[in-house]
Amino acid sequence: MKTLPLLGAASLLIASGCQSQAQYVNQHWSERSVAPSMSRHFLSYNPATDGNYRDFAWEKKRSINWTIRRHFFHHNPENPFQPYDAASFAPRPNNSLVPHPENYIHYEGIAMGAILYGASGAFVPLPIDSIIGTFEEGGGDEFFAGVNEFTRPLGQVTTSFLYDGLGLERASEQ
């Protein structure tokens, strides 16, 4: 019996975030205003004013991080009387699971995993904002740019090992 409400909630979230049609947002008597209205209410995202979803989701995650730092660690990155932390003002990293899964999963994914654990008994972190950002236009390229960033050192080590092991000249030596 627990799976039916979970499936209903999941399908509602998926249906609300699948498509955004900014030109129909304020036309309340059109069926095209349903998806943007639901995404605005469930995700707090308005495509007309918030811009790119990945940037919006990162600002939301950064705000959560800063709130946790302020309340639990008594450190405010914007306070000029505390030590400056350059990482707090760094540009947004790639929206990718690797090399830093904590940026992709974040607290939202852990909370959704806890909800799934309560409903089904299996803990699966489900980062909804990151997944929506991955399926947004350009999100897949950004996701695989993070994967490439993660696998590039392994590829360089493997390539150099093969060149040395086989006795081949590298392109830089020719």
Image (cartoon, rainbow, N blue to C red):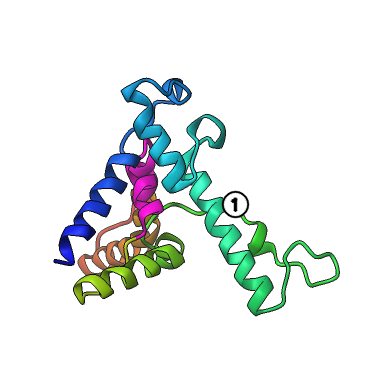
Position of 160 relative to 36 (above/below): below
Q: Position of residue 74 (x, y in %)?
A: 71, 77
- Tell me which corner region of the image, top left, top right, bottom left or bottom right, holds residue 135: top left
Q: Is residue 63 found left or right of 48 in the rendered image?
A: right
Q: Is residue 103 found left or right of 115 in the rendered image?
A: right
Q: Position of residue 89 (x, y in %)?
A: 66, 57
Count neighbours of disc 1 (C-alpha within 10 A) and say few if under 14, some if 14 to 19, many if 20 or more: few
Q: What is the tally of numbered marks visible in this picture?
A: 1
Name the main secondary structure of what is drawn in magenta.
helix
Q: Amino acid at mark 1?
A: Pro
Q: Residue at x 73, y 68 (%)?
A: 76
- Tell me which corner region of the image, top left, top right, bottom left or bottom right, holds residue 126: bottom left
Q: Is residue 142 magenta?
A: yes
Tell me the quarter of the image containing the N terminus.
Answer: bottom left
- Determine the residue located farthest toward the right in the rendered image: 81
Q: Which residues are magenta?
A: 127-143
Between residue 10 and residue 56, name the one nearer to us: 10
- Tell me which corner region of the image, top left, top right, bottom left or bottom right, holds residue 109: bottom left
Q: Residue at x 86, y 70 (%)?
A: 81
Whether residue 134 can be seen here = yes
- Determine the residue located farthest toward the left in the rendered image: 1
Q: Position of residue 97 (x, y in %)?
A: 36, 60
Q: Position of residue 163 (x, y in %)?
A: 27, 63
Position of 22 relative to 144 (above/below): above
Instruction: Residue under label 1, please give it.
Output: 91
Q: Is residue 144 magenta?
A: no
Between residue 79 and residue 14, name the one nearer to us: 14
